[in-house]
Image: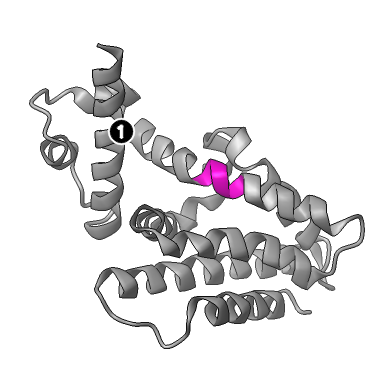
Amino acid sequence: MAATGASTRERLLDEAELLFARVGVQGATTRDIVAASGQRNASAVSYHFGSREGLLLSILARRGGPVDDRRGRCRAALGPTPSTRELVACLVRPYADLLESAGGRAYLRIVAQLRGRFAAWRVESDVATTKHLARILDELERRPAGSEAARRERLVGMIMLMTAATAERARVVDQGEVPDLGHEEFVETLGDMCASVLGT
């Protein structure tokens, strides 16, 4: 029975992830998700996740946790005085590497839809999936010159650039198109662009 429950939960996560990415977080209904996952029980989402919002947060945590672990390892390897570009790479590389899988691309497309509620997502999500992200963002926020408001604006701009650029590339790949830049060149270019937004 436990195995069946686990597989049902994973199936709901998989199908919701794809639908949220392709139809939109607001466009995909609970009914759509339940039907796509092959469930007959209309309350399957509520049973496994508590609510539609709980389902969304579970999707974010499922992909976000491993990404944040990679951020932490990257940051730890840099030592006490990393450059801004090195810190940016700790954000960009693990995030952009999600482009290599269909589930990862779906996650990138979902996060791009949520960037207007980024701060709330950091609070609502499991702290374990964003602790290294928060630490690196805090370090970066202290780097650029200017007022506190200006530094925060630059940081938000960098996040929006990173999420929008990766989501667009995910969309292109999902449609079967070949991007102009190879993966490695894209990651390096995006890192340079994000560092430039911060004024470095």
Q: Quadrant of residue 192?
A: bottom right
Residue 138 appears in the figure: no
Q: In this view, does 90 lie above or below 186?
A: above
The quarter of the rendered structure image containing the C terminus is bottom right
Q: How crowded is mark 1: few (under 14 residues within 10 Å), some or many (20 or more)?
A: some
Residue drawn at 40 percent across, 74 percent down? 169
In-image side of 60 versus 50 (left or right): right
Looking at the rendered structure, the kind of residue marked 1 is: Glu
Place of residue 181 in the rendered image (x, y in percent of width and height, measured from the top left): 47, 85
Q: Quadrant of residue 77?
A: bottom right
Place of residue 159 in the rendered image (x, y in percent of width and height, measured from the top left): 58, 64
Residue drawn at 67 percent across, 52 percent down? 71
Secondary element at image label 1: helix
Place of residue 33 in the rendered image (x, y in percent of width and height, measured from the top left): 18, 40
- Predominant secondary structure, magenta span: helix
Q: Mark 1 points at which residue?
A: 10
In-image side of 87 versus 128 (left or right): right
Place of residue 158 in the rendered image (x, y in percent of width and height, measured from the top left): 62, 69
**Extreme residue in the left direction:** 40
* Relative depth, front residue between 159 and 11: 11
* Relative depth, front residue between 13 and 140: 13
Q: Is residue 173 above or below residue 115?
A: below
Residue 145 appears in the figure: yes
Q: What stretch is highlighted in magenta?
A: 64-68
The quarter of the rendered structure image containing the N terminus is top left
Residue 52 covered by magenta stretch: no
| Count of numbered marks | 1
Residue drawn at 73 percent across, 55 percent down? 74
Q: In which quarter of the image is residue 193?
A: bottom right
In-image side of 163 versus 143 (left or right): left
